[in-house]
Image: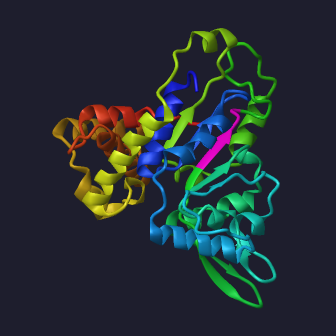
Amino acid sequence: MKGQAKAKRALEIAAAGYHHLLMVGSPGSGKTMLAKRLPFLLPPLSQEAALEVSRIHSAAGQVLKGLVRTPPFRAPHHTVSYAGLIGGGAIPKPGEVSLAHRGVLFLDEFPEFSRDALEALRQPLEDGVVTASRAKASLTFPARFLLVAAMNPCPCGWYGDPERACTCTPASRQRYVGKISGPLLDRFDLVVEVPRLTPAELARAPKGESTEAVRERVLRARERMLSRQGRPNGELAGRALREHVHLSQGAEDLLQAAAKQLLLSARSYDRLLRVARTIADLQGSHGVEEGHVAEALAYRKTL
């Protein structure tokens, strides 16, 4: 894929550390194409994970020819019902969040999903499971997935575009962005802008790295994480995060300055630490240096 170097780098970081990613950009900027490339960067499922994923898909009524060996990629339409996304029904069945277990859940046109369904994502994003309770049964399904979302910057889609004028009022744009609550937005470790490229810019853009080259980096970084702490960096929090981050003095000073200037919450501070740790792992660095923190700060676009 030509161009979009920053977005492709964010995709690499997301795949390596299992960091939730939000892409913001005008129509035709390549957000969907980028998201569809993500499963090719992820490590194959282990035997245990393959069994988990296969059981979930079987419970949903899918006919399988064998174990699911590759990470699932689910991309439900924004008109999906609450039960379809989260799980439920008269006899509870897995929803899209469970069908994406150990894989990717891609939500395009993110603000267009129902508010109730979006808010219900917060619990599985935090706990990795979802419970569907009905009169006949109450079932708990695994739901540890990598969330990738894409949205336009405004209802018409052209806010900030250098060539097309936005027709939205400030109030309508605020309502559109406001469909995503602060607590849900806070679950994304990476928020990146994906600008639309003109045909001339696409023609001049150099050919990027092959998927295989990026995947090799991702696999090496994931192996470092698993050997060090037994899980991806995106799942670290609290004491475990601080135990394994290994900040240099320069990196710590930059983090403290950023926290003070940007008024970072404790959760936002941890997000920066997780992303910086993954960037360090991609570079094969034992500790997190100032440059790793500086790059992590670049993925903090505000809506």
Image quarter where the C terminus lies is: top right
Q: Nearer the viewer, residue 151 or 266?
A: 151
**Quadrant in the picture for residue 79:** bottom right
Image height check: is 4 above or below 103?
above
Residue occupying the far bottom of the picture: 136
Extent of the magenta region: 148-153
Q: Nearer the viewer, residue 45 or 29?
A: 45
Report the residue at 52% width, 68% height from top: 50
Report the residue at 46% width, 33% height from top: 9
Report the predominant secondary structure element of the magenta stretch.
Answer: strand
Q: Looking at the picture, how far across and down is residue 92, in whole percent?
A: 74, 80
Report the residue at 74% width, 35% height from top: 173
Q: Looking at the picture, how far across and down is residue 209, in whole percent?
A: 47, 27
Residue occupying the far front of the picture: 65
**Quadrant in the picture for residue 35:** top right
Q: Report the side of 224 relative to 112 (left or right).
A: left
Image height check: is 129 above or below 242?
below
Question: From this viewpoint, is residue 257 visible?
Answer: no
23 in the magenta segment: no
Q: Looking at the picture, how far across and down is residue 1, in whole percent?
A: 58, 27
Question: From this viewpoint, is residue 76 visible?
Answer: yes
